[in-house]
Image: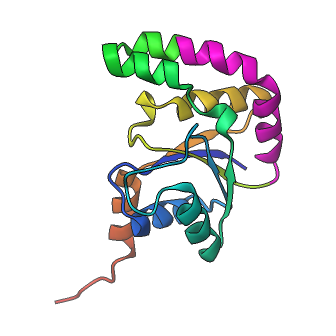
Amino acid sequence: MSIFTIGYEGLDMEGFLALLRTGNVETVVDIRELPLSRKPGFSKSILSETLRLNGFEYLHVPELGCPKPIREQYRQDGNWPRYTQHFLNYLAQQDDVVGELAAMATTTTCALLCYEADYNFCHRSMVASAMHAVNDLPVHHLQRAALRIALTDARPLEFA
């Protein structure tokens, strides 16, 4: 088992689903505080239905979303170290939820979902690290570059 993370920034639904399949993900865990998106198909109701129709489970865990005051401060100052510290302080208060999710990840292949393409600048990497500290499962980040490689590898060969 592994813990996966995924961001849907820059992906359409087809690419998003393909990325989930590359990790053999079974359950998508939406860790956005508010599971709404301006991007068509990625708000909670339509996303959960699309995932279900494609063989994935969906779980929304708002307690692991970044609280609005922390997000707003980051939007104002762009100070990533401050954002990280504030979110880690918040996350330290969520031990029960992190523990439950870490336990679940030992029985089903989960992908933590948020928006940002770059996991280095998304709270999902911090949540994944907190889960890893509980269950020692490896963390993998599903990214578009991996999808390009996978799709390229799947193309039939042409011979002259």
Question: Which segment did they paint magenta?
Answer: 86-107
Closer-to-camera residue (137/9): 9
Q: Is residue 81 left or right of residue 4?
A: left
Q: Is residue 64 left or right of residue 16?
A: right
The C terminus - image quarter: bottom left
The quarter of the picture where residue 148 lies is bottom left
Magenta span: helix, strand or loop, mainly?
helix
Any part of residue 78 in sight:
no
The mark tally for this picture is: 0
Q: Measuring from the top left, give residue 24's x and y in whole percent.
A: 62, 62
Residue at far left of view: 160
Does 98 sit above or below residue 28? Answer: above
Residue at far bottom of view: 160
Is 95 in the magenta? yes
Closer-to-camera residue (47/26): 47
Q: Is residue 120 left or right of residue 57?
A: left
Residue at image coords 38%, 43%: 117
Residue at image coords 73%, 50%: 1
Any part of residue 75 in sight:
yes
Residue at image coords 74%, 24%: 94
Closer-to-camera residue (6/148): 6
Visual colour scheme:
rainbow
Does 19 sit above or below residue 35? Answer: below
Is 3 in the magenta? no
Q: Measuring from the top left, give residue 85's x and y in whole percent.
A: 53, 11
Q: Measuring from the top left, give residue 6's x and y in whole percent.
A: 50, 48
Residue at image coords 63%, 31%: 127
Q: Measuring from the top left, give residue 82's x and y in whole percent.
A: 45, 9
